[in-house]
Amino acid sequence: MMSILVQPYLIPKILATHSSAALVGVSLMTGFFAFGTPLMLHLITSKYVTRIRYDSKRNVYIASVYNIFARERE
């Protein structure tokens, strides 16, 4: 989120240097941190079980986790 807030400050300074490579590089980096970090956090933490239930009819344990949209999944 911080990278999106800093863009209005950084982009005019980069445009003043007249370097399109620098503009593309900074845009890619801020895009990665804005969208890549939450995705990486989800991939790391999605493996953790939040709740375990036992179904006596089927004789199985059911583990619950949350998906990327914060919806419970079994």
Image (cartoon, grey):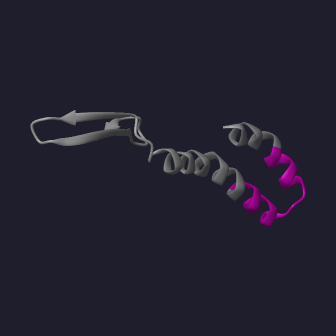
Left or right side of 23 for 72: left
Residue 23 vs 3, above or below: the answer is: below
Residue drawn where x is 40% and y is 40% of the image: 49
Quarter of the figure that contains the N terminus: top right
Q: Is residue 20 magenta?
A: yes
Dominant secondary structure of the magenta stretch?
helix
Q: Position of residue 35 (x, y in %)?
A: 58, 48
Residue drawn where x is 41% and y is 38% of the image: 69
Residue 53 vs 46, above or below: the answer is: above
Q: Is residue 16 magenta?
A: yes
Left or right side of 33 for 7: right
Q: How many marks?
A: 0
In this view, the residue farthest toward the left is: 57
Q: Position of residue 47 (x, y in %)?
A: 44, 47
Q: Nearer the viewer, residue 36 or 66?
A: 66
Left or right side of 20 for 73: left
Q: Which residues are magenta?
A: 10-27
In this view, the residue farthest toward the right is: 17
Quarter of the figure that contains the C terminus: top left
Q: Position of residue 4 (x, y in %)?
A: 69, 41
Q: Nearer the viewer, residue 72 or 23?
A: 72
In this view, the residue farthest toward the bottom is: 21
Determine the image quadrant of residue 57.
top left
Q: Position of residue 5 (x, y in %)?
A: 72, 36
Residue drawn where x is 79% and y is 66% of the image: 21
Q: Nearer the viewer, residue 39 or 52?
A: 52
Residue drawn where x is 57% and y is 44% of the image: 38
